[in-house]
Amino acid sequence: MKAALIVVDMQEDFCPPNGSLAVNEARTLAPTINTLLSNPGFTLRIASQDSHPPNHISFAPNHPPPNNLPFEHFIEMSNPAAGKETETKRQRLWPIHCVEGTKGAEIIPEIDTKNIDLYVRKGMDARVEMYSAFADAFGNLDAEVNRSSVDVHLKGALEEKGITDVFCVGVAGDYCVKYTAIDAARAGLRSYLVEDAVRCVDPGVGWEEAKRELREAGVLVVRSDGPEVGGLSGVV
């Protein structure tokens, strides 16, 4: 068994007090995540970062009023992959966040980045949302369109290191962390989401629905002090 830790989107724009898309209590996750990053049982430690162009499709101000309120309104988004343009998905609109090269796109200083082995920048294609660090919202993994969305082929990087198990933490538990964990399972890996190391955009009912989706996809929801994590370093 070889395990990887994926720290999802612990960026300034997702953290209070000043983040444009701040997830409640996100910054308080840093001590738990740093403890996980220091666990010698992880072969590979990865950090993903949203890195959006200013004209990204998910940004509410990039759409005409009156139906362009962040969090409240949705648009129909088309699959940018060649030959699949008729495939659409409903896309929630967000405030402008994590624009490439801005302070908001930076990982918060509370995260101990000296223990990060690999960075994955995602959401770089203006035409399509990308929550997961593996694939865009339409599941494009290896198509040319995905290479314009993300700068690292994550599945390939994990295979290169012989990774069998993936543990996902960060924000938001009901969006980017959830979809990253689900895609890890779809890639044939044993996938875990560490519940006390995530915070959600829509806690409560939204998180309960996310856990249902995770279970259906074969993802185990665990805790940082549980046997799954403890077993990595021989502490059970």
Image: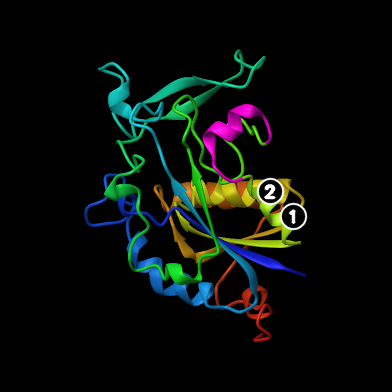
Q: Residue 232, located in which quarter of the rendered image?
A: bottom right
Q: Are there few (<14), some (14-19), or many (20+) residues within 10 Å of tag 2?
A: some
Seen in the picture, residue 136 relative to 41 is either above or below; the reply is above
**Kind of residue at badge 2:** Lys
Q: Residue furthest left?
A: 18
Q: Which residue is mark 1?
A: 159
Q: Which residue is mark 2?
A: 155
Instruction: Point out residue 119 in the picture as x, y percentages from the top left corner.
Output: 51, 55
**Kind of residue at badge 1:** Glu
| Quarter of the image that includes the C terminus | bottom right
Taking 68 as reference, is 151 left or right?
right
Taking 7 as reference, is 3 left or right?
right
Q: Are marks 2 and 1 in contact (CB under 8 Å)?
A: yes
Instruction: Point out residue 43 in the picture as x, y percentages from the top left corner.
Output: 66, 70
Helix, strand or loop at mark 2: helix
| Quarter of the image that includes the N terminus | bottom right
Q: CA distance from mark 2 to mark 1?
A: 6 Å
For the record, the magenta segment spans 142-152
The verdict on residue 153 being magenta is no
